């Protein structure tokens, strides 16, 4: 029963009993009170003869027709079955409803419905034969549908049949929208099925295309959330919501929200219906996703047109994956995952699991967040199509490099014609194809085309700038990074900036980490191009790596700041790439600073007193010490971020934890290999390697354990090489004994743990 019918019933009840029934919903109560107030202020007397309802014992008559029976009532009129006496055919007639105390539609509303129906020549929408204004009341003579209401017949249909019916209705609604008509009252009782299960849409009495009209009109169970708020505009997506409710009801046998009108409206505003599969386990997951996608509470999250919904229904009927991924999935999943994450945290607090086990379980749950973009997850699989697509993108980049070399280094290409044909037009074509594929829901393929086009852009721009003479390098300018004039600093800057801007746009459009990583790389290239103007070439020629590192610090800050902003802006796919870039840049800055011992020099420290006088490289020990200290710094930074950082920082944290033990040990490995320092460095290297493997137990870092094992083996080799022990059986026997001792120690430790557990 729609809103108007409920209101009319309450008015009749008041006239019969002199009061209203208990527990009237607030919305209806306010409307009834307004009606009674207006009625009391008017001295209406008896009902005029021309407005009186027809006698219940008889049926209305229409010139040229024989009235057979009353079929029912719509949103603003009553429908009768007639026989056309002239053409001898059965038709239906709809007249403005007349009932004591009831509401009636205006002739303008009735005329609008007639005009709306007259616009159609679609077999899925009831046809209008005649609109009579000379009769009182006005009447619409239309096609008679000999069939059943959709809601009554749906339970006996298979799921594919239900989907096919909704697909036809959705396609017909899209046609109405293209003609500027929005139904605004779609529901199963307004859809008839003929003998061939073909749908016919009825009752366009509430149709409208005005954004400010249609609020709180229609049947509550099928209202879209924005129809409850007059401040929100209405558009074609309101009908999309109703289509979703219809599909939901066909799948579940009930509407998403039930109860009194107040309860329905409250539940509608919250927007969390039960999943159809909870009603019937046989419901296809694709149809569930389509229904929930169309029923999104926010219009921007729904299908943006009935056509999009039709396409997804076509995919289901063709056995293809659908594009719908309702936000309710993420919300429901998050609500059910959070208790598990809380349990894992409690297990860790009680020492029931180790930190690395808790991290592994937590990461497995966090990975479910990626399901918001299923196509991205699917694109990570090494399918034959993915291999071919990204191999093609790589070949495009390689070919562009070779073409650039042929043009700029070997003068094998002259003019712009060749570069435009080989690089420029393919760039445009690949991006246009990628855009088309993305719109047609082939996102993974579209990203590969975007990457292929992006690989051509920088090299084409460099050739274009050279051929047009833009930003050419001045001859003999020592500030230029490339002395041969192949590329100028300004050309590098403009090229990397334009390519970076385009890749950022594509990354935001596709929400993919691949394009986000490319954006980070191009930003690094832009930073290097800027350093070229600051004297990068002279720093490289004079081995002033510390100056390079010093000027790269702003890039680390830029990456970190971008990651922080992107995460706060709900763009985790881009934030993760930015944080990883920040960590890689940090590693590069500190390691460059360590070259030639400059890091210790800035700190006012030196280790030169530990080196023998015959060592030629006086800064070697300071450099290697600084590199080892960097490893400690990487670990401390990762530990701090792990403790207080955000989810988007986890990948960067894992990277730093992996690098840290190798960064600590590899300088010692180099010291041992050179053989110019005290032989005790060999044993110190071995001891630290074993120590790091043991430390892995306390922090549960497998990267430390693997680093310890690898470097222990390398230390044993270097010791044997230094002392020429390869032909000494005693060395091999010593290592075997050490291995047996380690196994025995493991056995003893395991036995003690067993006793403690008992």
Image (spheres, rainbow, N blue to C red):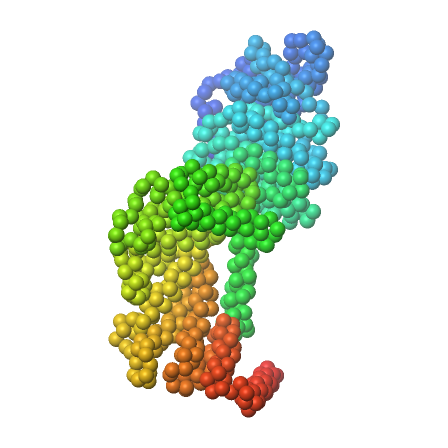
Residue 295 in view here: no
Residue at the farthest bottom position: 730
What residue is at 71 percent from the left and 16 percent from the top? 90
The front one of 583 and 312 is 583
Residue 395 in view here: yes
- Please determine whether, in this image, residue 102 is positioned above or below residue 226: above
Q: Indicate the position of residue 542 as horizontal and vertical percent values.
A: 28, 65
Q: Indicate the position of residue 483 as horizontal and vertical percent values.
A: 31, 54
Q: Quadrant of the N terminus?
A: top right
- Please determine whether, in this image, residue 16 is positioned above or below residue 558: above
Q: Quadrant of the C terminus?
A: bottom right
- Please determine whether, in this image, residue 480 is positioned above or below residue 754: above
The front one of 239 and 310 is 310
What residue is at 58 percent from the left and 31 percent from the top? 186
608 left or right of 668 in image: left
Q: Indicate the position of residue 254 as horizontal and vertical percent values.
A: 64, 41
What residue is at 27 percent from the left and 73 percent from the top? 601
Q: Indicate the position of residue 77 as horizontal and vertical percent values.
A: 59, 22
């Amino acid at each position: 029963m729609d809103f108007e019918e409920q209101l009319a019933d309450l008015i009749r009840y008041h006239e019969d009993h002199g009061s209203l029934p208990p527990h009237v919903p607030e919305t209806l109560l306010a409307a009834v009170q307004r009606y009674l107030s207006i009625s009391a202020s008017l001295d209406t007397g008896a009902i005029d003869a021309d407005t009186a309802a027809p006698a219940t014992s008889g049926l209305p008559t229409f010139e040229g027709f024989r009235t057979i029976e009353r079929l029912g009532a719509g949103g603003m009129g009553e429908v009768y079955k007639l026989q056309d006496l002239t053409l001898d055919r059965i038709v239906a007639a709809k007249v403005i409803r007349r009932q004591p105390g009831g509401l009636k539609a205006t002739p303008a509303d009735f005329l609008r419905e007639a005009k709306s129906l007259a616009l159609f020549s679609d077999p899925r929408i009831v046809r209008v034969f005649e609109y009579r204004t000379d009769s009182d009341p006005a009447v619409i003579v239309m096609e008679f549908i000999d069939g059943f209401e959709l809601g009554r017949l749906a339970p006996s249909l298979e799921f594919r049949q239900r989907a096919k019916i909704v697909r036809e209705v959705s396609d017909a609604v899209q046609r109405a929208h293209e003609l500027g008509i929005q139904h605004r009252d779609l529901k199963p009782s307004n859809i008839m099925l003929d003998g061939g299960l073909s749908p016919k849409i009825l009752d366009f009495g509430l149709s409208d295309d005005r954004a400010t009209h249609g609020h709180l009109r229609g049947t509550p169970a099928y209202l879209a959330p924005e129809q409850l708020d007059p401040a929100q505009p209405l558009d074609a997506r309101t009908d999309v919501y109703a289509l979703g409710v219809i599909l939901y009801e066909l799948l579940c046998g009930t509407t998403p929200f039930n109860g009194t009108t107040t309860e329905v409206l409250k539940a509608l505003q919250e927007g969390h219906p039960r999943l159809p599969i909870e009603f019937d386990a046989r419901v296809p997951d694709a149809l569930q996703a389509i229904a929930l996608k169309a029923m999104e509470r926010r219009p921007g999250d729904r299908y943006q047109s009935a056509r999009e919904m039709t396409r997804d229904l076509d995919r289901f009927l063709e056995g293809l994956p659908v594009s719908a991924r309702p936000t309710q999935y993420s919300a429901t999943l998050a609500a059910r995952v959070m208790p598990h994450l809380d349990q894992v945290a409690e297990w860790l607090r009680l020492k029931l699991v180790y930190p690395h086990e808790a991290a592994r379980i937590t990461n497995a749950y966090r990975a479910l967040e990626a399901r918001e973009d299923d196509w991205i997850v699917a694109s990570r699989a090494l399918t034959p199509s993915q291999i071919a697509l990204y191999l093609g993108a790589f070949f495009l980049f390689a070919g562009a490099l070779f073409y650039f070399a042929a043009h700029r280094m070997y003068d094998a290409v002259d003019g712009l014609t060749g570069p435009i044909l080989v690089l420029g037009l393919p760039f445009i074509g690949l991006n246009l194809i990628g855009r088309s594929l993305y719109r047609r829901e082939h996102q993974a393929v579209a990203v590969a085309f975007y990457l292929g086009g992006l690989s051509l852009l920088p090299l084409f721009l460099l050739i274009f700038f050279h051929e047009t003479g833009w930003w050419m390098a001045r001859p003999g300018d020592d500030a230029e990074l490339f002395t041969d004039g192949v590329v100028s600093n300004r050309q590098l800057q403009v090229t990397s900036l334009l390519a970076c801007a385009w890749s950022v746009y594509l990354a935001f459009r596709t929400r993919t980490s691949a394009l986000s990583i490319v954006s980070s790389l191009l930003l690094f290239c832009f930073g290097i191009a800027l350093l070229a103007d600051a004297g990068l070439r002279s720093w490289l020629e004079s081995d002033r790596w510390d100056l390079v590192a010093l000027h790269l610090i702003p890039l680390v800050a830029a990456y970190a700041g971008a990651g922080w902003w992107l995460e706060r802006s709900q763009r985790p796919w881009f934030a993760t790439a930015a944080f990883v870039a920040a960590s890689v840049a940090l590693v590069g800055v500190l390691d460059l600073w360590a070259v030639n011992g400059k890091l210790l020099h800035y700190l006012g420290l030196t280790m030169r007193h530990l080196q023998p006088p015959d060592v030629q490289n006086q800064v070697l020990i300071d450099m290697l010490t600084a590199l080892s200290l960097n490893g400690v710094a990487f670990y401390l930074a990762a530990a701090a971020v792990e403790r207080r950082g955000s989810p988007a920082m986890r990948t960067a944290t894992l990277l730093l934890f992996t690098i840290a033990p190798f960064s600590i040990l590899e300088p010692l490995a180099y010291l041992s290999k050179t053989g110019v320092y005290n032989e005790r460095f060999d044993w110190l290297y071995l001891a630290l390697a074993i120590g790091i493997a043991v430390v892995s137990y306390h922090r549960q870092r497998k990267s430390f354990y693997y680093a310890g094992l690898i470097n222990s083996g390398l230390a044993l080799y270097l010791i044997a090489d230094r002392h020429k022990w390869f032909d000494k059986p005693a060395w091999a026997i010593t290592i075997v004994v050490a291995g047996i001792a380690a196994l025995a120690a493991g056995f003893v430790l395991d036995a003690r743990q067993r006793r403690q557990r008992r």
